[in-house]
Amino acid sequence: MSYTLSKAQADSLVSRCSESNALNPPFDRHVHQVDEFIILVNNTQSGYDGYIPDTCVSDKNANALAAMRLVSHFIPVADVLFVSPKLDILIQRRVRGVTLDKVMKDMTEEQRAASILLVADLVCKLSQHTNGTSPQTVSGTRPIFHDLAEEHLNLTPANLRNQPCVLSHLDLSPSNIIMTDDCSKVAALIDWEFAAYVPLETAAYVHQKCNGHHGSAWANLFDVVKVMLGSQS
């Protein structure tokens, strides 16, 4: 994954970030769209609703970059164009399309089922990559950044802890899935900072806990994944 923007070009883009082009409230990061670029700048001050930014955002950025570098040849991801030396500024090329959360409510039942199959197929591809039985982030650290994943690992009975740890995104919210405009394909999976090697059951637990409000079909995405993996074995 090569970075094609110079520091001067990156500084120019960052200087154009403002409230008018912010994409969401500044929790751990300020996220802006400037022209065809998405700019992520670590938030170093508490602010929005009193939120205090995570102190390990740069570590999460390093993990996201490691994950995207690993999967970019078989999973659609955003092009990373610039990374600052301290990992506190990332600039990506904007992926054309629409996030799944924006269109899901207007989809027919058949379209929703098709989108679930598309994402489940990507999860299956990720799960082909394992690192034995040692849960860890893609960048090789522990604890895993997602608290629910650590919760599940700590609750898992000892006789199940030797399950293979598979590569998992761990944040498959519909807002992190960009579809093509006609919703026929996944244009990109974004926000890889939680990516880790965990047992498939841990990934399923995290997904169901975080996505119940999107409806049972989406929350049970990993039921589809398990069926697909079973048919491949």
Image (cartoon, rainbow, N blue to C red):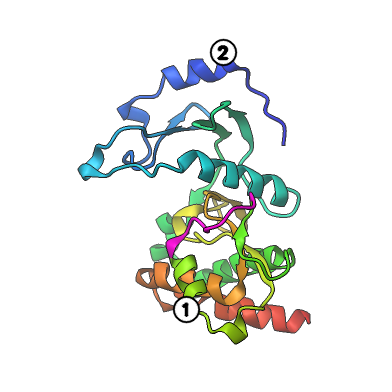
Q: Residue furthest front?
A: 158
Quarter the C terminus occupies = bottom right
Of residue 183 and residue 170, the one placed in the foreground of this image is 170
Is 207 positioned to the left or the right of 25 in the image?
right
Q: Residue furthest top?
A: 8
Is 139 positioned to the left or the right of 154 in the image?
right
User: Does dot 1 land on a helix, a strand or a loop?
Assistant: helix
Query: Is label 2 or label 1 in front?
Result: 1
**So how many labels did they put on this image?**
2
User: Residue 5 falls in which quadrant of the image?
Assistant: top right
The answer for how far apart the CA atoms under marks 2 and 1 are is: 49 Å
Q: Residue furthest left?
A: 49
Q: Is residue 118 above or below residue 24?
A: below
x and y percent of residue 81 in the render? 62, 30
Look at the image and tell me whether residue 101 can be seen: yes
Q: Is residue 232 above or below residue 115?
A: below
x and y percent of residue 22 in the render? 36, 33
Identify the amino acid type marked 2: Ala
Of residue 27 and residue 183, the one placed in the foreground of this image is 27
Residue named by callout 2: 8
Instruction: Tell me which segment is drawn in magenta.
Output: 139-147
x and y percent of residue 48 in the render? 24, 40
| Few, some or many residues within 10 Å of mark 1 (<14, 14–19, 20+) | few
Quarter the N terminus occupies = top right
Q: Identify the disc placed on residue 155.
A: 1
- Residue shown at 67%/28% (left/top)? 3
Q: Is residue 214 above or below residue 188?
A: below
| Majority secondary structure in the magenta region | loop
Is 190 covered by the magenta stretch? no
